[in-house]
Image (cartoon, grey):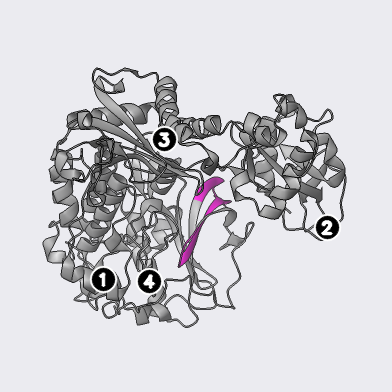
Amino acid sequence: MLYDPTRRPSAADLAEAFALCSGGPTADRASAEEFPIAMLGENTAEGGRPHGNPLAVVPEEPAQKPSRDPGIPADKSGMVVEGRYRLTRQRYVGTTSTTWQATDELQGREVALKLFDTPRAGTGPGEEDFLADAERLAALDIQGAVRVSGYGLHDGRPYLVTDAVDGDDLGRLLDLAPGTLPLEKIREIGGQVAGMLADLHRNGLLHLDLSPSAVTLCHDGRVLVTDPGLCVRRLPRINLSKHMRPTPNPFGLLPPYRSYEELFENVAVDHRSDLYSLGCLLYTMAIGAPSAAAALTQREAEAHRRSHPRPALPSGFPPELEALVTDLLAINPEDRPANAAEVLERLTSSGADDEELITAYRAVRELDPHGARMGRVLRDAIDEVLNGEVTGRYDLKHLTKAERAHLGSLVNIAIQREFVFEDGHAMDFSIADVDVDCRFSLTFGSWTFPHGTLGHICLLVWADDYVSRWSVGLLRVKQEWLNTGRNRDLRATLKAGHRDKILWLWREAELSENILLHMTDTDLEAVFGNRFGQGRVNELFRRAQRRRIGRNAVRTVVQQKDYMKRVRGNGGSRSALRDEGIVIMGDNDAHRHIARQLGLPVPREGEFVSARIVPALPGIGKPLVEMDGRLWCLASPEDPVHRAPVLPSQSEASSDHMDGPRWR
């Protein structure tokens, strides 16, 4: 029996739901006998709890988190929900709810607790709808769905308690390794999500909140879907700044991963809305960003409906997968696959289109899953050609023409050395026995292709020191994808309309910041205006606080080979700035722990972070760290200067440090 769309509450009903000022009943598996389970076939449309009208049309305005009812206390760490669940760490803040890590003090275990926001006015039936849906979900044992172990109302606010999950959400995976995921990974994740949806839909329920943050990759290989929407059908809980292609419109962006009928049409939804969201997930994993159709206002949606562009996957993915994604992202629900079981069958049966491209892709990602090595290679290559230690340069615009051409060779050589690629037969190097040519450009899309690269695979590399971003992808070069006009070296360029054929290893990944490029002219004059190297580096750490400072920036400022001597505590900046209350953390574990506890950027390999700190007063409400037997916090501009403590050495780092900041 599938979900009855007439049971879906309207936006008006939702605005009235869940707002009783007093707390409501709670339920969990331990007390299941007090809450009889509604079995399939009971409480159907013929005779059950009341239901509202179809969802109202979403207006053309930015999606914003609604303000909380002033009668409802703000969530905070330490708050106890229904006398049982103590909130310990905020994990995710969404548009209509907040998810917390919590402790079940009755059973002595860690759980996840999702606490919904509520509007002012509400009715009893709204509470009943939520409790009935939560009770039904808790009674089911659906493979691939996180277990609901408790639910209820706290101060009139609905909440769900689910088991704590050991793993990372898909959104974090995409953040760590921006770009396309391997075909096998897309099949694995998409297949498990499709299987879960098939079971959920067979039991008459919908999820209606699929997004990368709702898909958890467990350490044992399982994929768990979390964050069920239940009967809370307002705008979704999605971080609009991530996994989203900007759209040039004056009305703001609506959340991605939502079907047209959910956001724009005055109709009831069914299981096919979940299938649309699954299509968005597959597209995100394949291309590294959601479909543009998922981030539109109502006016743009109507224009998109008329043009109906076909979503294109990068080259290397099988045409069967592209056809499946196209069908899932169909505007009309009738044009989508019939059910999740059909999606699962089609997803697992699709083959590879370009085996060599996929082989090379898989080999590189296995060597560098998150792109850390490639990002370091590009940072080091740029720093090498700048040679700031000798020249004092920190801006690529000061390179000569020959040096700019040499940078491409440096990147080629550095990649081959870092990943130990063998020489290729006809191309630059061999990746898993596949000939690959390396093409580098400082301008995105300006890679050039000699005639000899036609038919071969190229590793396309782009880095921009001004925006601190880089991308690397693979492309099988085809004549029809190239511009007919060639430059004076008889090299062609890729047509802008065919950049979607690139199979991205990493896309728009973060390049370690060249801090000197992003300081104000006043600060740069103060740094470089000092006659002495020690004075220059002191001024750098004084003026670039709370930001990562790379070793090459220090080299460039000092312009001496013994640059580390100018940082250390024995007469270096750590000693010189201590009287000003400034500490300088490096890349060892003890210093990283201090930065993490203070809520600062954590230094990566070869980086420093400086900050002024002061002794913490009781109730300061800031992240704290303990050093020299007392608590310290970041200084505010008005705080008086206190002499800073001596930072601990690596050997003094405690093995039982907390991962997150302490607050008091």
| Label 1: how many Cα within 10 Å (few below 14, some 14–19, many 20+) | some
| Amino acid residing under circle 2 | Asp
In the image, 243: left or right of 40? right
How packed mark 3 is, by other alpha carbons closer than 10 Å (few <14, some 14-19, many 20 or more), is few
In 3D space, how far apart are the residues under numbered discs 2 and 3 (Cα atoms)? 45 Å
Q: Which contiguous range is marked in magenta?
A: 93-111
Q: Residue at x 33, y 56 (%)?
A: 210
**Does label 1 or label 3 sit earlier along the sequence?**
3
Q: CA distance from mark 3 to mark 4?
A: 32 Å
- Residue highlighted by disc 2: 639
Q: Position of residue 280 (x, y in %)?
A: 28, 55
Which amino acid, mark 1?
Answer: Ala
Q: How many C-alpha atoms fall within 10 Å of the one at disc 4: few (<14), some, or many (≥20)? A: some
- Measured as percent of width and height from the top left, residue 597 is found at 68, 44
Among the two numbered marks 3 and 4 on one chain, the one whose residue lies closer to the N terminus: 3
Label 3 sits on a secondary structure element that is loop
- In the depicted view, which residue is nearer to us: 108 or 562? 562
Q: Mark 3 highlights which residue? A: 219
Q: Quadrant of residue 269?
A: bottom left
Contact? badges 3 and 4 (CB < 8 Å): no
**Dominant secondary-structure state across the stretch colored magenta:** strand
Residue 657 visible to an observer of this rendering: no
